[in-house]
């Protein structure tokens, strides 16, 4: 404005020759005639008027933001997922509050409580906590979408997932097709824990191929560098007859490659290595690593769409599964006999 002061809704109403309520309806998506809407928008543009997001939030008792809760932002897959959520939110006119829990259920519960207090429009989460915590959150924030992981006790929460079972199955079939029968699975459940999707898919794929599952080759390992390295070292030192290793994640795959190098094992002549998650360094290995590519960016994009746009589809049917892709590189070869 000429006097340097920011234009107000009253200024726009006066310039357009309408009431303040009419201007409010135009900017909140209410019902007004096309001619009136055009007149109000033209007056707003002339005055360089911008509606107050804070004011709208106070009136509607919500912030207009999306909470995105994930274990961390340094993992390549998580970074891709964040990029997908941000791109989708930008397209749909939303903004995102990114929070990292470090995989700590207690920290995650605090983050969710804070987001609920801020009255976000909804929450997208890679849940680390248990069903009880999330059940309490859903009671006060009905718009929740899970990404990359579901909690079995909360089937009513919509989810967007990668087809991990299909990806592991394709890897097992590929390795078996190369002649491998002693295939180790690095990343199994700890004793007393329920096997995850990838371990179950590994077992089922071997069973369908008629290959016995050797329990000694299903190695429990967490996706943390020290734990992954210890598990890979124990496996390859204990079982010299292993001809192929299927790592359930990229940190586990990294550990298998490092241990093989330290033991002077040739890849793939002595042992074939493949993993779930196709990260950038996989192609830079020598030889490049065979991997299952998971659509992190697409998962984030679809989760955000489900939260903001496809509200009618939420809570209906099974989780949305997005396909994975087997990327074949030089780290797997035909069986040449065991190292022993």
Image (cartoon, rainbow, N blue to C red):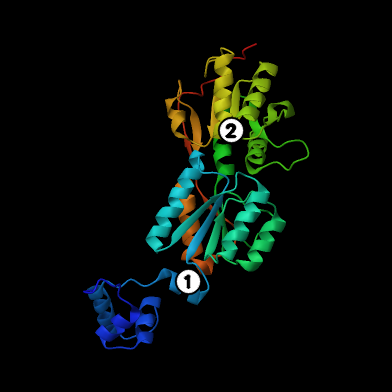
| Labels 2 & 1 near each other (Cβ < 8 A) | no
Say which of marks 2 and 1 sits in front: 1
Instruction: Name the image quarter holding residue 110.
Output: bottom right
**Could you say whether the residue bearing mark 2 is in a helix, strand or loop?**
helix
Question: Which residue is at 30% across, 84% downward?
Answer: 13
Farthest residue, direction right: 192
Asked whether 340 or 294 is in front, the reply is 294
Quadrant of the snapshot with the N terminus: bottom left
Question: Which residue is at 38% across, 60% downward?
Answer: 91
Residue 10 to residue 58: above or below: below
**Could you say whether the residue bearing mark 1 is in a helix, strand or loop?**
helix
Q: Residues within 10 Å of mark 1 (few under 14, many from 20)?
A: some
Q: Which residue is mark 1?
A: 57
Instruction: Name the image quarter holding residue 30.
Output: bottom left
Residue 35 to residue 273: above or below: below
Question: Which residue is at 58% across, 26% downward?
Answer: 255
Q: Which residue is mark 2?
A: 172
Can residue 324 be seen here? no
Residue 198 location, x and y as percent? 62, 40
């Amino acid at each position: 404005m000429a006097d340097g002061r920011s234009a107000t809704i009253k200024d726009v109403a006066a310039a357009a020759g309408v009431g303040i309520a009419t201007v409010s309806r135009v900017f909140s998506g209410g019902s007004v005639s096309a001619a009136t809407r055009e007149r109000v928008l033209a007056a707003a543009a002339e005055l360089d008027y911008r509606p107050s997001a804070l004011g709208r939030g106070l009136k509607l008792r919500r912030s207009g933001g999306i909470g995105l809760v994930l274990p961390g932002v340094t993992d390549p897959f998580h970074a891709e997922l964040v990029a997908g959520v941000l791109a989708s939110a930008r397209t749909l006119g939303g903004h995102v509050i990114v929070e990292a829990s470090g995989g700590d259920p207690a920290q995650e519960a605090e983050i969710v409580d804070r987001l609920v207090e801020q009255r976000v429009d909804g929450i997208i989460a890679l849940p680390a906590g248990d069903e009880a915590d999330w059940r309490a959150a859903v009671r006060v924030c009905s718009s929740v979408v899970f990404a990359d992981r579901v909690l079995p006790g909360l089937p009513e929460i919509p989810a967007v997932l990668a087809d991990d079972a299909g990806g592991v199955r394709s890897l097992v079939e590929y390795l078996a097709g190369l002649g491998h029968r002693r295939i180790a699975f690095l990343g199994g459940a700890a004793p007393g824990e329920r096997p995850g999707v990838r371990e179950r898919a590994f077992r089922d794929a071997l069973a369908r191929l008629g290959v016995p599952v050797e329990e000694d080759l299903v190695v429990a390992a967490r996706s943390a560098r020290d734990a992954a390295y210890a598990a890979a070292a124990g496996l390859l030192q204990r079982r010299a007859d292993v001809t192929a290793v299927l790592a359930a994640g990229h940190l586990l795959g990294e550990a298998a490659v490092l241990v093989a190098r330290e033991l002077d094992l040739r890849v793939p002549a002595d042992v074939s290595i493949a993993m779930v998650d196709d990260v950038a360094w996989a192609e830079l290995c020598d030889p490049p690593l065979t991997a299952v590519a998971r659509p992190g960016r697409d998962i984030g994009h679809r989760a955000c769409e489900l939260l903001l746009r496809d509200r009618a589809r939420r809570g209906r049917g099974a989780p949305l599964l997005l396909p994975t892709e087997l990327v074949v590189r030089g780290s797997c070869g035909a069986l040449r006999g065991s190292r022993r």
